[in-house]
Amino acid sequence: MMHSARWALRLLLTMIAAFILAPSAQAAGPTCHGKFVNPITDVCWSCLFPLSVGGLKIWPSGRPDTANPASPICACGSPIPRIGISVGFWEPARLADVTMKPWCFPNLGGIRIAPGFDIGQGYLAGPSMVGGRSQSTAKWHVHWYVYPLLYWMEILTDFVCFEQASFDIAYMTEIDPLWQDDSLTALINPEAIVFANPIAQVACAGDCIAGTAHLPLDPLFWCAGCQGSMYPLNGNVPSSIGHVQSSRLALSRFAYKMHREALAWGTMGSAGLCKKYLMPIMRKQQYRFQMVNPIPTVSGRFACSAIGASTMPPDAGRAYPAGGEDMGYLVWRKRNCCVL
């Protein structure tokens, strides 16, 4: 219970600081909306499954799952390896704000903590005529929280496979110049020019179908399925169909950006049994996104859908004008682990 107490105290101090700073922050810009995530009512706990031991699913689920190591026996450590059991599960590991309002924190109760100077812009513009048709554009910001919910709640005491960390705001794109400008973003994704052609983009239709029906196609790493192109790795969305579609695209790009900068690592498959590993080209199958703001998705097969899956119909009507334009997502991560 010590870990839960520390987490609760840290969250309480964050809330107190947020409410103290909120009045001056709200006056400095557009109104921010949101609410704190209730770990009981706002989390789709069935997204934890399927739970597998080796290649056998001991707790099945209707949601698609990645391939697990076939053998239930694993070994880690050197020079004398220790024998363990190979398990696979989905872990709620990160929380993300996705908003067009700089310094808006929907998952911290909808507060806006402005630094007092002009940095980081977001917008929704349109419609404008592009290629003979009406098209909207958007620019999103992302705040990335360390959020190992299973460890905090001590669902399984001393289960070493859970990420052991405390609540923290790990990244804010408002202070990242690479997130603001497409030219600077090319420093970390120079390969984007190879896929900026109609043939490469047409292939994303297949990724859209695969991600909606089962799992996204990892070989098509430049595609974000039904949401659009994964490049550039920033929040500039040139074709915004709606808040849910374009916010999920921005979050997908951000997750890829974290992997490209070695700030997020691989946890799935045989390579992840003993430790996390470098994954500079993100495997889309490793993640599921669950909306928690403005309206949580807590039930149904598409409550925590894969990267690139269609947002229709599961997320229809979950973004609305004025009070429902600031988005929050719980990021589920596939974990394969050797329990020693």
Image (cartoon, rainbow, N blue to C red):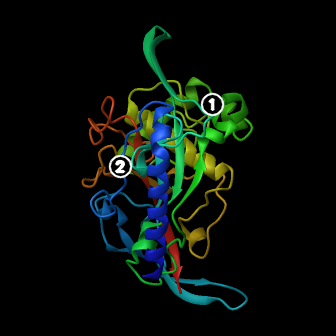
Residue situated in front as seen by the camera: 251 or 192: 251
Residue 181 in sight: yes
Whether pointer 1 and pointer 2 mark residues with C-beta atoms closer than 8 Å, the reply is: no
Residue 146 rendering spot, x and y as whole percentages? 53, 60
- Residue 328 vertical position relative to residue 298 in the rendered view, above or below: above
Q: Badge 2 is on which residue?
A: 35
Number of numbered discs? 2
Residue 147 rendering spot, x and y as whole percentages? 48, 62
Quadrant of the image containing the N terminus: bottom left
Q: Name the residue at 61% across, 68% down.
A: 276
Residue 44 rendering spot, x and y as whole percentages? 31, 59
Residue 23 position by quadrant: top left
Residue 242 position by quadrant: top left
Q: Please identify, in this view, whether the residue under mark 1 or under mark 2 is nearer the observer.
A: 1
Could you tell me which secondary element the residue under label 2 belongs to?
loop
Residue situated in front as seen by the camera: 104 or 59: 104
Disc 2 marks a residue whose amino acid type is Lys
- Residue 281 vertical position relative to residue 312 in the rendered view, above or below: below
Q: Name the residue at 50% across, 29% down.
A: 202
Which class describes the residues within 10 Å of circle 1: few (<14), some (14-19), or many (20+)?
few
Closer to the chain start, of discs 1 and 2, is 2
Q: Badge 1 is on which residue?
A: 118
**How far apart, in angstroms, are the residues tagged by discs 1 and 2?**
25 Å
Disc 1 marks a residue whose amino acid type is Asp
Could you tell me which secondary element the residue under label 1 belongs to?
loop
Residue 106 rendering spot, x and y as whole percentages? 42, 45
